[in-house]
Image: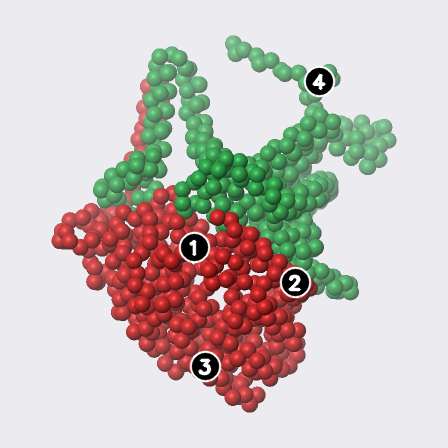
Chain colours: A green, B red
Amino acid sequence: MNGIIEGIYNFYEGMGMPADLLPLLPFLTVIALVFIVIFVLMRMLVKKKIMHTKTASFYMFVSVWIIGFLLFTVGPMIFSFYISFNKWEVVSDPQWTGLDNYRMLFKDTLFYKSLSVTFYYTLVSVPLQVILSFAIAILMNLKLRGIYIFRTIYYLPTLVQGVAQMVLFIWIFNPNVGLVNSLLRLVGIEGPGWFSSPDWSMPAVIIMSLWTVGGNMIIYLAGLSDIPQSLYEAAEIDGATAARKIWHVTLPQISPILFFNTVTSMIGAFQTFTQGFMINGGPDNSLLFYAYYLYQNAFMWFKMGYGSALAWVLFVIILVFTAIVFRSSALWVYYETEQTGGRKRRVRQKRA
Amino acid sequence: MMKKWSLIVLSLLVVIALSACSGNGGNTAQSSSNSGGNSGTPKGKITFAYWGAQSEADAIKQAIDNFKKTYPDIQIESQWIQKDYLTKLQTMIAGGTAPDVMLISGGDLPGFANAFQELEVDGSVFSSPTLLDSMSVDGKAYAAPFIIKPKVMAINVDLFEKNDIPLPSKTEPMTTDEFNDIAKKLTSGEGATKVFGSEPLYLGNWIYSFGGQFYSDDLTQSALGEPEAIKAAEYMVASKQEGIVPNDTEKQGQNMMNWYLGGRIGMFTDFGPWYLPQMAEVESFKWDLVPFPGGGGSKEVNGLALSKDSKNAEAAKIFINHLTQNEETQKIIGGNKNAYGIPVLSSATSAFEAIYPDKNLNAFVLAAEKQHAQEAQKRTNEIGNEMKAIDDTTPIGIGQKDVKEVFPQVAEKINKILQQN
């Protein structure tokens, strides 16, 4: 493959292309060739009446995404799976070592440390995020004058995320001049060292994670406005209090959205990286998030094979937890289209 | 029906045409690289990757220009990588597009040695025979020394005069005891205007002042558990407790160089050549440079390495030799106004000293020869992660545990990493 790419490169170089474009051209050429092949193939199938024009155009349209997905997601995944059975120092050739990388995991104290850090964060921050964003969404759903201004205010912090958020909060949690400790000092409390204390760095990150609940809030808001008013009216006639209405009407109606937010927040929490990366794993490895430990191994310590093995273990962990949440959803998620007697597949009607 | 198809074909063609023909009017000079010239000398194109700030890149460009004058047949394609140099290099090597020549620091060399070619370099031409050692792994040279960045101590002459302290020798390093005495005398005041004897001391420099080092001479064992290393650590803790350097609360979020420039630090010990340009603008106090106390500090040696997969190795070797061993080029790079570093040839160091003739830049030159080189391991980054325990658990950083207890533990963990092949 490298030979082909090089051939194309040299061809363009011979044509006198500008040097800045040269690295890009072989790639574009290959992509263009792939599409020409697909196009010709589809054309043939349509001509021979094996495929309908509409079906062919469907495949043509999705092919853009599918090819990108195969090239840039599935391809690297397969490669990382293969490399996880190798010792690969990146700058030299991979050596097959079988299951060594996976065996090493069990003896690696930092692996356990990073797991416990990640679980601590996930188990505390995800429920907090889900509850807080739901509570704010209920407040923001009140029919008040100027409520749109409040919705905007609560959503705005979501725009400052990732690195920018971390940089901001490193200052907010600065033990001497930071906002948090200055406020605590006003009421006579000497605040902890936050990011420079092994015990307080994780609470700091969890508090920080609540900064971006606005994103989930918007999704809840959309769900809340979908709840039919008639249900509330019926509850009111029955004499339900506000709390009862939330418990018996709002919660069941919004449970699919709760479910969605829980799953996505959980996956996101398992993949937390920036918070660990920005302060190098925190004091005493207290912020050694799994994804950051993986990054350290793969890109800083020249252990690409071990890093890949870590990635696949993370994949399995996320898969298992998502499966658990999905399974449990039968107990607490209510879909309006559901009928008694279990789910039934709707049979697709044949087009006339 | 046909109309739709032809539309799709047309749009595809446009895309291809755009991607293929954009900027067709670009240069055509490159194709001339293989024509003309006699066949004896290497020619063609080589790529050269380096890192650094704008000022450092300028210095390197001057050196490349000088090379081009001598060897017009060899084209140099510069790859100035401003951020994440090592990661980028790794990716390029893994992807089979490694640059022919790469700038590499002695500390990172062992990790990359597998991607480099062994070079035949005569170590005796350089100002110190140890320079080639820091470019070698297991006795094989994988890069040629190019530039040196040693550490010296910058002093605030006004503060010395104010406290009636005689100025230290410009050629002989003061002892650590003398340093301690002077630092105490320089320390005065309280709170936001307190003047400190020095900035917080750095183990990577001070371990050598007390005769210690990070690894055994054969690099197979950590030497952090040795008494010399522990003595250095204990002094660092003592300096904090005595208040002659800022403590953690005082230094949090502060730039120590700014404190020195503002006259709040008497002796700035971790002083590398990159600080010189901003020092040149100082007018509020007199300053000078003296050798690092106790003969400590460590120098960073940067070298030029040749890729294992280079297609034009002969030209690349000429390039490396010219940049590292040609006196004129070394004078250009060493004499750069932004003080890029100290030349590796003794005959070229005068160019560096000439940048600021009225300051004792000779301290840098002496350090470039004598100072301990940065100790390098293949697994430097992984070891660095274990070393974090020093900051996290001892009073050198934010912890409380005794250094006597922690250092041997860290040494043991490092030894485990060193045992991995």
* Residue A349 vs residue A147, the one in the foreground: A349
Q: Are marks 4 and 1 on the same chain?
A: no
Residue depicted at x 45% and y 29%: A66
Please report, as a chain letter, where disc 4 is located.
Answer: A
What distance separates the C-alpha of mark 3 from that of mark 2?
34 Å
Residue under numbered circle 1 = B110
Number of residues whose C-alpha sits closer than 10 Å to that of mark 2, classed few (under 14), some (14–19) or many (20 or more)? few
Please report, as a chain letter, where disc 2 is located.
Answer: B
Sequence-wise first label, 3 or 1: 1
Q: Which mark is residue B405?
A: 2
Residue under numbered circle 3 = B172
Q: Is residue B309 left or right of residue A79?
A: left
What distance separates the C-alpha of mark 3 from that of mark 1?
33 Å
Q: Are marks 3 and 2 on the same chain?
A: yes
Residue depicted at x 57% and y 47%: A293
What distance separates the C-alpha of mark 4 from that of mark 1?
64 Å
Residue B238 in the image: state x and y as whole percent. 64, 73
The amino acid type, in three-letter code, at marker 1 is Pro
Q: Do labels 4 and 2 share a chain?
A: no
Question: Is the Cβ of the residue at disc 4 closer than 8 Å to that at disc 2?
Answer: no
Q: Report the mark closest to the observer, 4 or 3.
A: 3
Q: Is residue B139 above or below residue A161?
A: below
Number of residues whose C-alpha sits closer than 10 Å to that of mark 3, classed few (under 14), some (14–19) or many (20 or more)? some
Residue under numbered circle 4 = A342
Q: Is residue A293 left or right of residue A43?
A: right
Please report, as a chain letter, where disc 1 is located.
Answer: B
